[in-house]
Amino acid sequence: GAVVSQHPSWVICKSGTSVKIECRSLDFQATTMFWYRQFPKQSLMLMATSNEGSKATYEQGVEKDKFLINHASLTLSTLTVTSAHPEDSSFYICSASNRGRNTEAFFGQGTRLTVV
Amino acid sequence: AQRVTQPEKLLSVFKGAPVELKCNYSYSGSPELFWYVQYSRQRLQLLLRHISRESIKGFTADLNKGETSFHLKKPFAQEEDSAMYYCALLGFYQTGANNLFFGTGTRLTVIP
């Protein structure tokens, strides 16, 4: 299957700083990328969907100014956690798919964010 | 609003026994449903999708619109089937946006 790479795999940052997480599709054009957050022993919570070249669609309860998503190219989407706080510590996962219905989503390996 | 429900957080079966992981969904439109699996220390990966009506690794899942269910079944469980299984729903909107929602997952343990 196709490969989706997330970077970094883990990051520790100080409270108040911003962190950028990259999600790249290595061998296919990802017209849609999904960003999830996963708390320990819980399921993936969809944060937002981004389509290349347009603004991301955020799920209810997710602050768009807090979690900035950019999907400027067909192979790269970024999630920036702005002014991070300890409660933002979590596991963030991206997935990418091609345009159209009934398309498989390929997942990145996830990024463990710890805010201290 | 869409919702995916997996009622069982944990499921243990003996090797060779049948296994069924339950999934129910709520969606106003015509859903597309998937089962994703996550083996230990690996990333999520697609197991099967309802459109394909295929059998992967002996697993099958039938979409029952009347019962709004998409249960995952395998007649004879194997030890290598032990993993976390997520049911997922892909929803489409007139705005062109879409989203991929996941259930809470079921951890399957196959006992030797």
Image (cartoon, coloured by chain):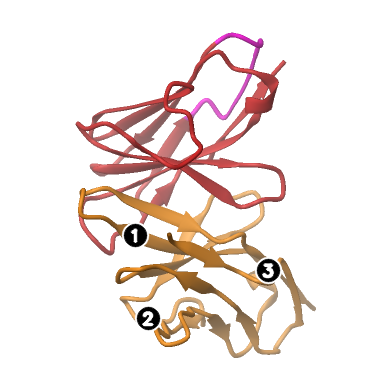
The residue positioned 66% from the left and 10% from the top of the image is A14
Mark 3 vs mark 1: give the one in front: 1
For the residue labelled by badge 1, is the local secondary structure a helix, a strand or a loop?
A: strand
The question of residue A11 being in magenta is answered with: yes
Q: Which residue is mark 3?
A: B82
Residue with the mark numbered 2: B54
Residue at disc 3, secondary structure = loop
Asked if residue A53 lies left or right of residue A33, the reply is: left
Q: Which chain is orange?
A: B
Residue at left offset 20%, top offset 56%: A100
Residue B29 vs A7, above or below: the answer is below
Q: Position of residue B87 (x, y in %)?
A: 51, 66
Residue B91: numbered disc: 1
Q: Give the structural element (helix, strand or loop) at label 2.
A: loop
Q: Mark 3, chain letter?
A: B
Image quadrant where one finds the N terminus of chain A:
bottom left
Identified by mark 1, the residue type is Gly
The span picked out in magenta is A7-17
The chain containing the residue under callout 1 comes to B
Please tell me if label 2 and label 3 are on a single chain. yes
Q: How many marks?
A: 3
Side of A34 where B92 appears, left or right: left
